[in-house]
Image (spheres, helix red, strand yellow):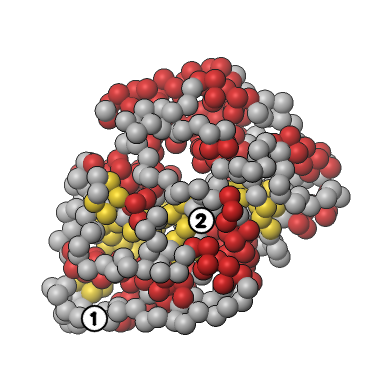
Amino acid sequence: MISRRNFITAIATGVTATALLSACGASGGEGGTAEDPTVLNYTWWGNDDRAERTNKAIALFNEQNPTIKVVGTFSDWAGYWQKRATEAAGGGLPDVMQWDLSYLRDYAQRNQLLDLSDIGIDMSGFESTLLPSGKVKDKQYGIPTSTNAFAIYYDPAKVAEVGIAEPSGNWTYAEYQKFLTDAGTASGGKYYGSSDFSGVWWHFNIWLRQNKIADFTADGQLGFTKDDLKKWWGLNAKLRGTPAIIPSDQVTQLKPKSPFGSNKTVSEPTWDNFMAGYLSDSGAAELKMVTVPSDDPDNLGLFLKPSMLMVASAKTKNKDAAAKFIDFMVNSPEVGEIFKTSRGVPASKAQRDGTTFEGVDAQVVAYEESIVQYLSDAPEPPIVGFGTLESEFLRISEELNFGKVDVDQAVDQWFSSAEDVIKQNS
C-alpha cells in the first residue's frame, strides 16, 4: 500500500497516479428492484458547498445502482447532533450517516451503530494506522472518508490591505498573538485578527501534545490538570476585548458562517479541508495556510485526523444497501473527483489514485506534505460523552470571551462538567 508520506509527496511533485475502478454498480442483494428500489436515508452536516457535492455523489450512486434510492438530508453542525440525539432516543437513526470522531465511542458503546467489519466494504486501501480511529473495542464502526490536519488560515488580500507582513508559520504563540493584534489594530475596526483560538478544543489538544500532556487516560479519565487548562485559557487573557479577537456576540450573529468566512477576521485556526467552504462563503480570490504556533519548534503537536467517517445505524433494515453506499462514498474515484479535498485528503488508495488535485485542492495536499515530519499517530475515538465536553468547552470559552466569567471560573465550570460526564459514563 502506498504510504501517506509517499502519496502526499507524489501528488505535491505532480506525479499522476493510475485510476482504479471502484466496484459500485448494482449487484443485487439489497432487496429492491429498479421499479421498487430500496430506500436508504443518508444525512450529513455542512454548508451549501458540501451539500452540492454530496447531492452529486448521491445522484451518481442512484444512477449506477437502480435497485437502491438514497435520500439525503443535511444541517449545520450544531443542529446535526441535536437531531441525532433525538433520533437515538427514539430508536430511529438514519440508515447511513456522516459522522465525527468526537461522537463515535458514545454511540457505538450504546449499540446504536452497525459493526462494519465484515459486511462487504473494501478496507484494503486504508492505512493500518488510520483505521483504528474508527474502531471501538475492536469493532469497525466508522470508515474514514478522508484526513485533515490543523492549520492557521489567513486571507493574503486582507493582510496586504491592512499593511502587515504575511505570516510564514514556524512561529511561537507570542508571535502568533502579535500578528492577530497587528492585523486587528491596523484595520481600523474593519476586521478582527481572528476568533479566540483558545476556545477550540482541537487546538487545545494540539497544545497539550506540544507540551507532552495527554488529553485522556486509557481508563477514560482526564489526562490534564486545572492548571494546564488555566495556562491555555489564560494565553489570550490580554487579547480578549481588543481588535485581536472578535467578540462572542458577533460570532453568534454570524452563524452558521464563521467570522473568517464572513470576512470579519483576517485569519482563523481550523482544519485544512475547510478551504473550499471558506472560499465559497467569503468570496475571497485566495486563501493561504501556515502551521499552528508552538513554543517548541521540533514539536508542533500535529496529526492527521479523520475529517469525518461513514457509519450506519445498528437498526437499519437495509444493511447490504448501506454497505454498498458506504463503500461507494469512501472508495469510488468518481466520488473523489466530486469532493476533491473539501472533505479532506481522500483516505482510501483507490479514491486518492483516481482523484486529480489542482489549484485549491493541490494547495491542501501541499500543506499536508509540508507537515509530514511533525505528524504523530491519529487519535483513537475520544471517551464517551466527549461531544458534550467539546460543546461545553466552546460554550464556556465564549462566556470567557464575552467577559461573563474569568479564567478561574471558566476552568472550574468546565472541570465540574467534565467530572459529571465522566462519572455518568464510567
> In the image, what residue type sits under mark 1?
Ala
Is residue 404 visible to us here?
no
Which structural element holds mark 2? strand
Residue 262: x %, y % from top left = 64, 51
Left or right relative to 369: residue 19: left
Residue 393: x %, y % from top left = 48, 32
Residue 223: x %, y % from top left = 43, 28
What residue sits right under mark 1 in the picture? 26
- From the viewer's perspective, is the residue at label 2 or at label 1 nearer? 2
Which residue is more in the foreground, 53 or 275? 275
Q: Is residue 21 above or below residue 422?
A: below
Which residue corresponds to the image point at 37% horizontal and 50% vertical from the top-left?
A: 133
2 or 1: tag closer to the N-terminus: 1
Which residue corresponds to the image point at 40% horizontal and 24% vertical from the top-left?
A: 417
Which residue is more in the foreground, 5 or 404? 5
Left or right relative to 198: residue 421: left
Q: Residue 321, labelled with which disc?
A: none
Residue 101: x %, y % from top left = 39, 48
Is residue 407 visible to us here?
yes
Which structural element holds mark 1? loop
Which residue corresponds to the image point at 14% horizontal and 75% vertical from the top-left?
A: 29
Which residue corresponds to the image point at 15% horizontal and 61% vertical from the top-left?
A: 317
Crowding at dot 2, Cα within 10 Å, few <14 / some 14-19 / many 20+, comes out as: many
Quarter of the picture containing the N terminus is bottom left
Which residue is more in the foreground, 319 or 13? 13
Going by the picture, which residue comes out furthest to the right?
163
> In the image, what residue type sits under mark 2?
Asn
Instruction: Specify the quadrant of the image occupied by residue 22.
Output: bottom left
What residue sits right under mark 2 in the picture? 148
Q: Is residue 384 above or below residue 49?
A: above
How far is mark 2 from mark 1, CA to CA? 31 Å
